[in-house]
Amino acid sequence: MYTKNNEKWILYSTCDEDSFSELRALNITPDDRVISVTGSGCRTLSLLTQNPRSVVSVDFSPGQNYLLELKLAAIRALSYDTLLAFLGVEECNNRMSIFESLADRMPAAAMAYFRRHSRAIKDGILFSGRHERFYVKVVAPLAHLLFGRHLKHLFSASTVEEQYRIYKQQIDGRLWRKLVRGGFSEKTLRLILNDANYHIKIDVPSIGDYILQRLDHTFSHHLAKDNHWVSFMFNGKYPNRTSLPHFLLRDSYDAIRNATTKMTLVTDNLIHYLRTVPNRSVDKFSLSDVTSCIDTEEFKALLSEVFRTARAGAHLCYRNFLAKYSVPRDGDVRMRREDAVSSALDRDDLAFVYSFEVATIGGTS
């Protein structure tokens, strides 16, 4: 698992979110000051395509911030073809030499971190996180062993209607449901994530049934062959250049390279960091699925700091996975939940397991 001396390797290495949703929710402008949660770095990079004035990307894990440094350096230094090969999307036999060529663009600590984990670079860093290895080593091989022919049909469907018919008739049976319920149990999630900061607060009656419901939704709404996360889940890779995470699409690559955004990476607890931020200084908050990592009291503290630091009219976007924390609906005009946008993202998000909370913050003088 790419670890030495009990050093914990990164949890996330690629995008298990749909950054189109983020951009739709936040409507970022070139004047905006943005705070983002780093995670795999992919969503933060997608924010750069809008060229905001500044982005501060925060993560408690140094490794996740190092990964963002690596991806940004690679985008800025490498051709598009070389970038995809280096990250692991396409074949490459000289990833370490490409990595070493980035040394003058990366902090020494980040270079040292990845030199200690050189196997992950050689394998393709995009698929080397603890979370991603579960799909590469377990989910995709098992799915193809048991449902390979049917999955091939599903990924070849030309319409959502055809795809959903294949899913219901050829895949969604007793064995499939048993595997999904077992693979997405609380015990399995805790084993995969192996992260003390991941609380996995659960507000759904059954994790497995929730995942099955959301799978049913995505196969009846989105073509799997065009969905980067579904493609990765069941294939352990991205099959082509059209089913890539937003930040890796060619237009996004060009936009990130051209962005003049001031980028700052902070390794800290998000709430602790927000307490250092001046009042009324942030325009947009892109907080990923932060609710998976905090309890109820921490959530209240987070919203309090978001409100304090937000400029009038600021936008907040965060995802809920198994913990369902809502923007308060108690009539407090300081923070207004955007019901229509939140519902639309619940329906349209390609990553399918998340529900959304989008809010506009009024601010006070």
Image (spheres, helix red, strand yellow):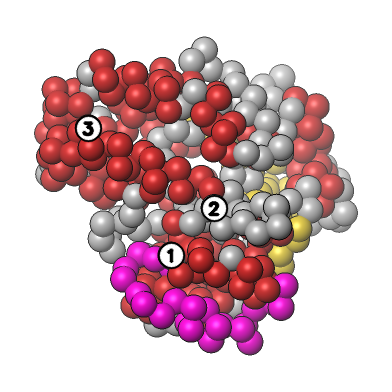
Query: For residue 30, what is the image quadrant?
Result: bottom right
Q: Residue at x 70, y 52 (%)?
A: 6
> Mark 2 highlights which residue?
1
Q: Residue at x 71, y 78 (%)?
A: 108
Q: Is residue 277 visible in this depiction of the protein?
A: yes
Q: Is residue 359 visible in this depiction of the protein?
A: no
Q: Earlier in the sequence, mark 2 or mark 3?
A: 2
| Residue range corresponding to the magenta coloring | 87-109
**Residue 7 location in percent, x, y?**
69, 55
Label 2 to label 3: alpha-carbon separation: 26 Å
Q: Amino acid at mark 1?
A: Asp
Left or right position of 279 against 322: right
Q: Amino acid at mark 3?
A: Leu
Label 1 to label 2: alpha-carbon separation: 12 Å
Q: Residue at x 47, y 82 (%)?
A: 98
Secondary structure type for disc 3: helix
Assess whether residue 250 is covered by the magenta stretch.
Answer: no
Density class for disc 3 (Cα within 10 Å; few <14, some 14-19, many ≥20) is: few
Q: Is residue 222 above or below residue 238?
A: above
> Mark 3 highlights which residue?
146
Q: Amino acid at mark 2?
A: Met
Q: Residue at x 65, y 75 (%)?
A: 111
